[in-house]
Amino acid sequence: MKRRVLSTDNHANDGIVRIIGVVMRICGVAALIAGSTSALAESGIASVYVHSGSNTASGERANPAGLTAAHRTLAFGTHVRVTNRRNGRSITVRINDRGPFVRGRVIDITPAGALSLGFSGLAPVMLEIAQD
C-alpha cells in the first residue's frame, strides 16, 4: 500500500492546514480518499460587510439581515460555526459569497451575524465546519 498526499495547503498567516485528499495504491489500483472537511479549523479576523440589494457570487440576492457570510475557498452552501474569541459567542452562517480580499481576514459576515456575535467592524474569530 502506497500513500501520497494529493494536496496540502499550509497558510502560516491564516492558521489553517487543509488536506484535500490522499491517493492510495492498493493491489495496483489507485484510489482517491477525500479528506474530511470536518477537520477544518481556521482563525483570524472577521469583518462586517453589506452588499444590500446586489447579487452575491453565488447568484442569490444579498440580505444584510440573514446569517450568511463570504469566504475565499469554502463551497457555497457550506455551514460554518463562527466563534467570537473575545466573548465566546458563536453562530452558524451559510457561505454564499466570495471574500474577504483583505490580508489577515478570514470571513466577511453580514451585519445580522456580527450583531449576534457581539461586534461591529472587526473581531478575532475561530471558524469550524458545522456538523449537520
Image: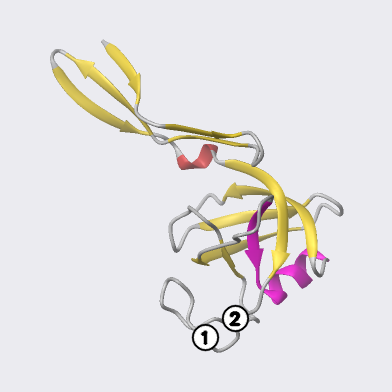
Residues under numbered marks 1 and 2 in contact, where contact means CB atoms less than 8 Å apart? yes
Amino acid bearing label 1: Ser
- How crowded pointer 2 is (Cα within 10 Å; few <14, some 14-19, many 20+) is rated as few
Residue at 59% over, 60% down: 101
10 Å crowding of disc 1: few (<14), some (14-19), many (20+) = few
Q: Is residue 120 left or right of residue 20?
A: right
Where does label 1 land, which residue? 54
Check residue 51 in the rendering and tell me which mark sits there, or answer none: 2
* Along the line of sight, the residue nearer the viewer: 84 or 124: 124
**Which labelled disc corresponds to residue 111?**
none
Please tell me which residue lies in front, 100 or 118: 100
Relative to 79, residue 9 above or below: above
Instruction: Give the mark count.
Output: 2
Q: Would you say 5 lies left or right of 109 here?
A: left
Depth order, front residue of 119/99? 99
Residue 21, horizontal then vertical, whole percent: 36, 32
Query: What span is colored magenta in the figure?
Result: 105-118
Q: Where is residue 60 in the image (x, y as percent from the top left)?
A: 44, 79
Image coordinates for residue 30, horizontal then vertical, percent = 19, 23
- Residue ID at (63%, 54%): 81
Give amino acid for label 2: His
Query: Furthest-top residue in view?
Result: 1
Query: In 3D space, how far apart are the residues under numbered discs 1 and 2 (Cα atoms)?
Result: 6 Å
Indicate whether 13 appears above or below 59: above
